[in-house]
């Protein structure tokens, strides 16, 4: 692993002063974008004593933070409230306060455009705001997931327009966020963090910052290496999920149980990592980030074939799930048109409250398009608002025995832990299970159809 060279000396007044402020937790930390990544990060920094200013364009989010009202599952309500009440954490829409910050961390969205190209406009807008207030002695780090080259090719030129010099007057680094929402074992603090600086001094200062709150910081030689590391991690997941999804489609034809096969393969103590099939991939990362790399690779006359193929398969499985529902109803002498389908779980994965890019949205739209009568229950998502390309707008129904019994088919798309699947199977007429959520249900198994 790369060693962080100690290049900052007392003679480099700006760098040395900033590093000392960071070590003593006196540096004012600004966090741009108070979402799933930014708010937990702001709280983590505040908990060790850094004064934190959160910036967001969304005034409702800013007001919530300032009244200590938590809206992110991975943040503890009492910790946010305590930091706000003690004046350690504040939020604002006033970007002129960036001038007060010694460290500025960018955590804004990086979606795809309608034509599936990277939309880095949020990063560009943040960099422009920073440039307006940039002053000597500040560290800027980017945490948003993006293609290799963004920090150097997009952010640096915008900041350099100020006439200030990177590595001397201000410091710039990329450090990807790896947070896994809902994961109780690995949190921001105990998940190793990769960091790459524009210059050796940038790396040394950014490394010092992250070492204050994170157990293991992993330095790499450049921001681009750190950017690619993150995209590679998510690509690895996307491709392995696609591999097991493809095997699932084959198992369906061969009449074999994919869940049994994957579980058995997972008993090999080396050379394999278990990925489970499902109704498709969702969230802010897996369906999106690999295509940032695909886009960038094209500039090098290179085609990322694995990524394209994985993308195709991970979309195809959503259509397969619709087909599976049709076949399951058919076996009951029913058709999809006018059938009552109760979708159980719409979040993109279990035990979280995020529905962005969830395969449930696509599957619900496809089912509705074919005439099905759709309702849903998700204890974490009381309402689905239209967003992104999805037009679904629905409220979660209560999971009563009557609701379960009335549905022609209960379709499990997300296996939240709080649901009693024994009761679901007992009360439902038919269950299509895309997550093996019913694996421990011992009775009424003839009602269950698994993907
Ligand atoms: N959610 C995850 O699990 C996760 C994990 C690792 C990495 N990431 C990456 O982190 C980045 C942020 O993702 P997120 O899930 O936190 O997004 P989010 O949508 O939850 O939060 C982003 C916030 O940024 C705000 N914002 C947008 N433009 C802004 C601007 N110009 N100035 C100030 N605020 C602005 C939005 O109002 C929103 O509150 C993305 O690049 C994402 O890919 C996300």
Image: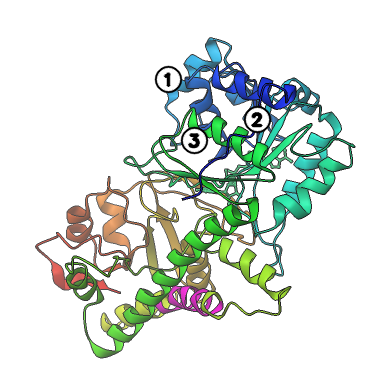
Q: Residue at x 44, y 68 (%)?
A: 280
Q: Position of residue 358 (x, y in %)?
A: 49, 59
Question: Up-down: is 361 above or below 401?
Answer: below
Q: Which residues are magenta?
A: 308-320
Residue lying at the far top in this picture: please name it. 86
Mark 1 Cα shell of 10 Å, populated few (<14), some (14-19), many (≥20): few
Mark 3 vs ligand 1: CB below 8 Å: yes
User: Disc number at residue 78?
Assistant: 1
Q: Position of residue 297 (x, y in %)?
A: 66, 72
Q: Earlier in the sequence, mark 1 or mark 3?
A: 3
Q: Which residue is mark 2?
A: 8
Q: Residue at x 63, y 54 (%)?
A: 387
Kind of element beneath mark 2: loop
The residue closer to the viewer here, 16 or 446, is 16
The residue closer to the viewer here, 448 or 58, is 58
Question: Up-down: is 150 above or below 447?
Answer: above
Query: How far apart are labels 1 and 3 at the CA level?
Result: 12 Å
Q: Earlier in the sequence, mark 1 or mark 2?
A: 2
């Amino acid at each position: 692993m790369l060693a962080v060279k100690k290049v900052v000396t007392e003679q480099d007044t700006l760098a040395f002063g900033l590093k000392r402020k960071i070590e003593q937790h006196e540096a004012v930390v600004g966090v741009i974008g108070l979402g799933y990544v930014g708010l937990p990060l702001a709280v983590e920094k505040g908990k060790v004593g850094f004064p934190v200013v959160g910036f967001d364009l969304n005034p409702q989010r800013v007001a919530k933070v300032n009244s200590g009202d938590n809206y992110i599952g991975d943040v503890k309500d009492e910790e946010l409230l305590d930091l706000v009440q003690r004046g350690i954490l504040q939020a604002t829409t006033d970007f002129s306060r960036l001038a007060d910050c010694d460290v500025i961390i960018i955590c804004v969205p990086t979606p795809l455009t309608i034509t599936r190209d990277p939309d880095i406009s949020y990063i560009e807008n943040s960099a422009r705001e920073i440039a307006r207030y940039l002053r000597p002695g500040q560290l800027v780090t980017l945490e948003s997931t993006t293609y290799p080259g963004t920090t150097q090719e997009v952010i640096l030129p915008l900041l350099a327009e100020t006439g200030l010099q990177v590595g001397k007057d201000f410091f710039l680094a990329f450090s990807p966020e790896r947070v896994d929402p809902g994961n109780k074992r690995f949190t921001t603090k105990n998940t190793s963090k990769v960091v790459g600086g524009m210059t050796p001094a940038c790396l040394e200062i950014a490394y010092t910052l992250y070492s204050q709150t994170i157990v293991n910081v992993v330095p790499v030689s450049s921001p681009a290496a750190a950017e690619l590391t993150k995209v590679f991690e998510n690509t690895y997941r996307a491709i392995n999920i696609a591999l097991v999804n493809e095997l699932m489609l084959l198992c369906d034809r061969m009449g074999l149980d994919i869940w049994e096969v994957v579980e058995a393969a997972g008993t090999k103590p080396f050379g394999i990592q278990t990925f489970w099939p499902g109704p498709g991939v969702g969230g802010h990362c897996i369906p999106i980030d690999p295509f940032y790399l695909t886009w960038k690779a094209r500039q090098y006359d290179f085609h990322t074939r694995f990524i394209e193929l994985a993308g195709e398969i991970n979309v195809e499985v959503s259509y397969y799930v619709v087909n599976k529902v049709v076949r399951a109803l058919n076996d009951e002498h029913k058709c999809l048109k006018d059938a009552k389908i109760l979708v159980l779980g719409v979040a993109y994965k279990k035990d979280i409250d995020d529905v962005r890019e969830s395969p449930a949205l696509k599957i619900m739209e496809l089912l509705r398009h074919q005439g099905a009568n759709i309702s849903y229950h998700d204890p974490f998502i009381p309402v689905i608002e239209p967003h992104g390309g999805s037009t679904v707008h629905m409220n979660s129904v209560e999971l009563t025995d009557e609701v379960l019994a009335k549905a022609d088919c209960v379709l499990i798309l997300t296996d939240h832990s709080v649901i009693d699947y024994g009761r679901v199977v007992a009360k439902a007429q038919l269950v299509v299970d895309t997550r093996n959520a019913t694996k421990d249900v011992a009775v009424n198994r003839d009602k269950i159809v698994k993907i």
